[in-house]
Amino acid sequence: MKTSNKKVAVLGATGMVGQVFLDKLVNHPFFELTVITGSDARAGKTYGEEVQWLLPNPMPEALSDIKLDELDISQLKEKEVQIVFSALPANIAKTIEPGLRAHDFYVFSNASAMRYDPNVPILIPEVNPESLSLIEKQGFPHNGFVITNANCSTTGLSVALAPLKPFGIKEVFVSTYQSVSGAGYPGLSALDISGNTIPFIDQEEEKMKIELQKILAQSFDIFPFCVRVPTLFGHLETVWITFEKKTEITDIIEAWKNFTFRSKNIELPTMPVSPIVYCENDKFPQSKMSFWGTPSGMQVFTGRLRKQGDRIGFTLLVNNIVKGAAGGSIANAELFCDQYETAIAC
């Protein structure tokens, strides 16, 4: 089914996650990029003038002359925007996003500010599409809502673990090696990270423990370490799992291979049909693969499967700013249109 274009806004458009939002929305088949916002000081200036483009692909020409606006709810209403993508920092999002919801906007957020509200889904379409129904507890279809994506490192792990749930997950030991783009821009000083690793990322381990169990709707022990490393893009993770059922390496590979995503009514252009790609060469996945896959940056790569005692280990790679951030939010909006097409004019 072909959808009609839905007018959308992007808040925090000049930051790194905002850049991914715009890159993927500028030619989106059923979202019309209508309003973009930056800081108040940038209002009225063009995107090409104000942005320092940081993505590995060139900035689409169509973005260059778009003017940045202040965040103004009445203007969003006048321009018939209903879907809002938020790349705002959590400390700002915690006041802005509930206000947008109160004015009946559909907010798809990359921020952590509202993730732990019991009525706000932490949504990953191929993992927990059923959680989308939580928007009805927020008052949809008569009121607006907020949907969040997960923390970037949690997203990749959730995708890799979702097809393994039938084996009964008992314990998860995970170490993450997270790129500097995860710290935002401007983020870490070059003096802090060049030729260095930092074995602590504030709140990252706590987010992983809380979010993983909410997303997978299972209770198990999680033991995370999160480390910042001097790579530009991509979060690499090493994982060890114990299962309730006897599980072999071949079982894991088969589960990942059979893990697919198909929408009900419309094609979701940001969603991969095969969310997980297993690398048979033990030297992969690597951070340089972050923008590989179809669509670019939206697949999770796994590798180095091995069994030791009663534990199975593997590595995984997730693109933190695409699958783990803006691309994930756009896929969430696509799923919303797919599931609620009769309730909205998507």
Image (cartoon, rainbow, N blue to C red):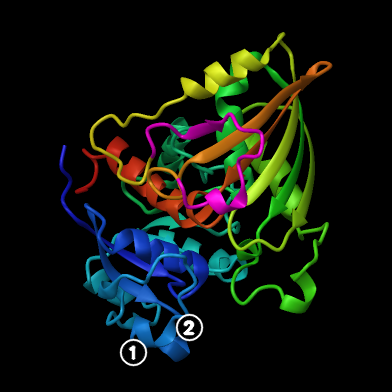
> Mark 2 highlights which residue?
39
Task: Report the magenta residues as a range.
Answer: 272-292
Was residue 273 drawn as part of the magenta stretch in this picture? yes
Residue drawn at (23%, 40%) of the image: 341
Residue situated in front as seen by the camera: 278 or 29: 278
The secondary structure type at the circle numbered 2 is loop
Q: Residue furthest top?
A: 246
User: In this image, 285 relative to 12: left or right?
Assistant: right
**Residue 181 drawn above or below residue 341:** below
Task: From the viewer's side, name the closer residue of 61 and 210.
Answer: 61
Q: Which corner quadrant of the image does residue 129 belong to?
A: top left
In the rendered image, the vertical position of residue 158 relative to residue 171, given as above or below? below
**Residue 89 placement (x, y as % from top left):** 58, 68
**Residue 167 shows which numbered tag?**
none
**Residue 226 screen position, x and y as percent:** 76, 51
Q: Which residue is mark 1?
A: 44
Q: Residues within 10 Å of mark 1 (few under 14, many from 20)?
A: some
| Alpha-carbon span between mark 2 and mark 1 | 11 Å
**Magenta span dominant secondary structure:** loop
The answer to if 239 sits in the magenta stretch is no
Residue 319 visible (yes or no): no
User: What is the count of numbered marks?
Assistant: 2
Can residue 330 be seen here? The reply is yes
